[in-house]
């Protein structure tokens, strides 16, 4: 298959890619849905998608092979919707393979578009194979209806087929016909409209009235909100300055303006976030294809069930969550779901189940990925962990099942006997855990032998505008996200205790160790004996943030707690872009860059 698009045609190409990508989204799920439950509406929808892509590709001469491929697929779908052939696993596999080629073309076109040069590439795919395979599948999957029709006189069949094709051509091109006769009188126009309603395959219910907005534009608008937030913060600063001069009238006016800015910023932010939010169920539907392909490859039968209701999530979060979810699904199929014969031994249905559920939990959503497989073999996990030196035999004696199960998140931990393209490479679950934590989320796992395994993820709805505590230490300002902060306090020096090499404070009966921010940020390798004195100097009170990291509390000592701060996370400067201890940056009221810290990587 050869593709050629000149740079002068890029305006048309952009429209083609955007429109086609919309039709290709979740197309795999639609094909698999047809395999599970034959529904004429689903077949018609699939036909419309392929037909539209075919029509769009016709505007670019260099995409003639795409047009031909769509025509071939369209013929199969046309037979299905007319009940001339029956649905089979072979036909579903054929449709998936051809759609994959169309997707591949889209990816390569988009890649070429970004380079800004004439596009020329070839894809290793034989259109003649697709055509011959189509003919073979049609012959071998004739429906009862079509078999009975074969007894008709050949000439009659050909004449009928020609009539059908002519009628369909009239239907599919009815809009062009209407435009040509646009100068007709009203009666003729009304007749034409009635014809559209009765015969067209494209109904009004499929017209999309939404306005398309690129995510780049939304992100840019979100950046502007960040500037408004910074301005809002500066108003508060100015208000304090005016209060010092006791200009009550000016204070009142400025106070009202600040309230207006607050309200406006909050409303704009809410609207933008709504624009960024997308239904989670629509994203998860594409995993049906992954489950089907992996199950077939491993000789297993697996059904994917999705129960997300109306849960929505930030598009940016979804993109970063995609790989962990795919890995957990692959893990369930590979390690969890048994082969059909083994499931029968345990009295289970031959077909295993993977269930994805999602529920709203305030600012977070909870996503559960569970299977009804054999569960995690704790003895096998522990044996591998000892062999790899992850735990000693002595440590193993005091470990409970939950401790052992959590060893799967250790880097390099794998129980696969054979390395395959699915698993056993010693990487995976540790990456899943670290990705979830970078999203400021949590992951836990529960498993029961011969019952199944469940991975439970707690994920923030959005990582856009959030709150943190602005602190100062050794002349530099930092922001610590509020999600990690339990409380902020100032303590007297005489309340500080010493435990071996650490200072600590007793807060409501709980002893919490204290470390300076410089140590948490790895600026110092060791804690000096008098490090509390160094921080406090001549001050009588020590500012501390009590943060909770990995279920442990620790006090972070700073020079001053400035204020709570709303911030929009911006990309890090290039020089520190790969520093894990920094989540991103924010611009303060004076235009300075302030680093937003990631407590997950604090040195404690």
Image: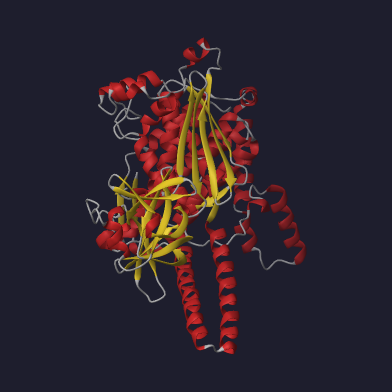
Judge by depth and name the residue closer to the eye, 37 or 377: 377
**Numbered-mark total:** 0
Q: Residue 249's spot in the image, x, y percent?
A: 59, 89
Q: Quadrant of the N terminus?
A: top left
Can you name the residue that lies furthest to the right here?
A: 187
Residue 590 lies in what quarter of the image? bottom left
Q: Is residue 186 visible?
A: yes
Judge by depth and name the residue closer to the eye, 549 or 162: 549
Left or right of residue 213, residue 112 in this image: left
Q: Residue 166's spot in the image, x, y percent?
A: 61, 45
Q: How is the image coloured?
A: secondary structure
Judge by depth and name the residue closer to the eye, 570 or 60: 570
Q: Residue 539's spot in the image, x, y percent?
A: 35, 68
Q: Residue 575's spot in the image, x, y percent?
A: 24, 62
Q: Which residue is at a point 62% across and 59% down the rendered structure image?
A: 209
The answer to whether residue 187 is above or below residue 248 is above
Can you name the residue that lies furthest to the front here?
A: 494
Left or right of residue 454, residue 530 in this image: left
Q: Which residue is at a point 41% across and 30% down the rendered structure image?
A: 331
Q: Is residue 162 visible?
A: no
């Amino acid at each position: 298959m050869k593709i050629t698009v000149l740079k002068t045609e890029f305006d048309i190409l952009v429209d083609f890619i955007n429109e086609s990508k919309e039709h290709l989204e979740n197309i795999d799920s639609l094909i698999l849905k047809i395999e599970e439950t034959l529904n004429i509406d689903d077949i018609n929808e699939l036909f419309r998608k392929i037909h539209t892509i075919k029509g769009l590709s016709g505007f670019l001469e260099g995409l003639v092979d795409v047009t031909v491929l769509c025509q071939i697929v369209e013929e199969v779908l046309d037979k299905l919707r007319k009940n001339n052939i029956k649905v089979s696993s072979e036909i579903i596999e054929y449709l998936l393979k051809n759609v994959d080629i169309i997707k591949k073309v889209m990816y390569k076109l988009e890649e070429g578009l970004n380079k800004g040069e004439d596009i020329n590439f070839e894809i290793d795919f034989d259109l003649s194979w697709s055509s011959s395979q189509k003919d073979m599948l049609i012959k071998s999957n004739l429906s009862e209806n079509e078999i009975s029709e074969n007894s008709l006189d050949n000439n009659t069949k050909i004449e009928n087929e020609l009539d059908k094709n002519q009628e369909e051509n009239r239907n599919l091109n009815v809009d062009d016909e209407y435009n040509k006769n646009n100068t007709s009188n009203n009666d003729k126009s009304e007749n034409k409209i009635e014809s559209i309603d009765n015969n067209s395959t494209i109904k009004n219910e499929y017209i999309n009235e939404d306005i398309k907005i690129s995510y780049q534009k939304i992100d840019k608008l979100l950046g502007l909100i960040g500037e408004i937030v910074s301005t809002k913060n500066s108003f508060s600063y100015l208000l304090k300055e005016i209060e010092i001069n006791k200009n009550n009238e000016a204070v009142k006016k400025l106070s009202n303006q600040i309230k207006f800015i607050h309200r406006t910023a909050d409303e704009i932010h809410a609207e933008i976030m709504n624009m960024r939010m997308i239904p989670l169920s629509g994203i998860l539907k594409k995993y049906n294809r992954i489950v089907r392909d992996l199950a077939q490859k491993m000789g297993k039968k697996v059904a994917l069930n999705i129960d997300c209701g109306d849960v929505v999530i930030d598009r940016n979060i979804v993109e970063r969550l995609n790989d962990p979810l795919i890995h957990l699904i692959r893990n369930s199929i590979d390690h969890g779901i048994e082969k059909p014969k083994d499931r029968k031994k345990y009295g289970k249905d031959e077909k295993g189940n993977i269930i994805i559920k999602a529920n709203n939990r305030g600012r977070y959503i909870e996503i559960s990925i569970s299977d009804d497989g054999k569960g995690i073999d704790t003895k096998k996990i522990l044996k591998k962990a000892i062999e790899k030196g992850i735990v000693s035999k002595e440590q193993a004696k005091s470990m409970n099942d939950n401790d052992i199960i959590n060893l799967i998140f250790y880097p390099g931990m794998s129980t696969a006997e054979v390395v395959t393209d699915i698993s056993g490479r010693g990487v995976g679950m540790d990456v899943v855990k670290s990705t979830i934590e970078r999203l400021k989320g949590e992951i836990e796992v529960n498993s029961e032998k011969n019952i199944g395994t469940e991975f439970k993820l707690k994920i923030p709805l959005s990582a856009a505008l959030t709150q943190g505590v602005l602190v100062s230490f050794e002349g530099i300002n930092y922001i610590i996200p509020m999600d990690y902060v339990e409380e902020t306090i100032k303590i007297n020096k005489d309340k500080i205790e010493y435990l071996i090499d650490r200072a600590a404070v007793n807060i409501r009966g709980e002893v919490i160790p204290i470390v300076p921010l410089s140590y948490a940020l790895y600026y110092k390798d060791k804690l000096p004996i008098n490090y509390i004195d160094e921080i406090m100097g001549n001050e009588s009170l020590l500012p501390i943030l009590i943060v909770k990291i990995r279920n442990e509390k620790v006090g972070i000592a700073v020079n001053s707690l400035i204020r709570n701060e709303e911030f929009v996370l911006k990309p890090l400067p290039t020089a520190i872009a790969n520093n894990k201890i920094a989540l991103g940056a924010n611009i303060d009221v004076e235009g300075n860059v302030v680093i937003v810290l990631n407590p997950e990587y604090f040195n404690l």
